[in-house]
Amino acid sequence: MRKLQSKDVFNAMRAISKANLKEELKPVLAKISENKMSIEDAGIEGILAVMEIFSAKKSEQAIYEVLAGPFEMTAKEVEELDLNVMLDNLIQLAQENNLKRFFTLLEGMISTK
């Protein structure tokens, strides 16, 4: 697994734009950036909330594409991950990156568009 890179923010923004989810994500991202929670909790809560919104909009493929970069695998491999491996990867992603800051950046980008 690699650390998040600048391109991951833009991959996330493209997925959000493609799925037309900007308004649905604003409250989730605001909650994450305002809450006093650990980085791990913010990351996991954020990713799970985003996954829930994407799945409701039938845009789950976009989540696989966003996670494929940091997970260093293809979107198809992310889609077929064992659930326990997926959760372990999400925890590792949250621990190795300041996901609270990542989601705060996304919130700022979404709010200004």
Image (cartoon, helix red, strand yellow):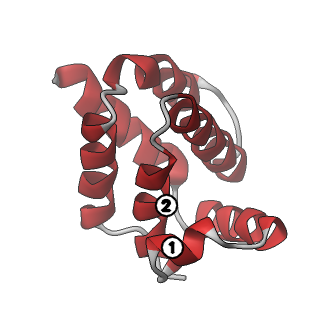
Q: Establish if 39 lies above or below 67.
A: above
Q: Which residue is mark 1?
A: 76
* Image location (x, y in percent) of residue 91: 71, 63
| Residue depicted at x 67% and y 30% | 36
Q: Please say if the residues under marks 2 and 1 sit with CB atoms less than 8 Å apart.
A: yes
Quadrant where the C terminus lies? top left
Q: In this rendering, would 17 be left or right of 19?
A: left
Image disc number at residue 25:
none
Question: Which amino acid lies under the numbered mark 1 shown in the image of this protein?
Answer: Lys
Of 74 and 95, the residue lying toward us = 74
Distance in Å between CA atoms under marks 2 and 1 = 7 Å
| Residue depicted at x 50% and y 30% | 33
| Residue depicted at x 46% and y 70% | 75
Image disc number at residue 64:
2
* Image location (x, y in percent) of residue 6: 26, 63
Please identify the residue farthest to the left as the structure is shown: 113
* Mark 1 burial class by Cα count in 10 Å: few <14, some 14-19, many 20+: few
Please identify the residue farthest to the right as the structure is shown: 84
| Residue depicted at x 40% and y 73% | 69
Q: In this rendering, would 104 be left or right of 79?
A: left
Q: Establish if 89 lies above or below 42.
A: below
Question: Which amino acid lies under the numbered mark 2 shown in the image of this protein?
Answer: Tyr
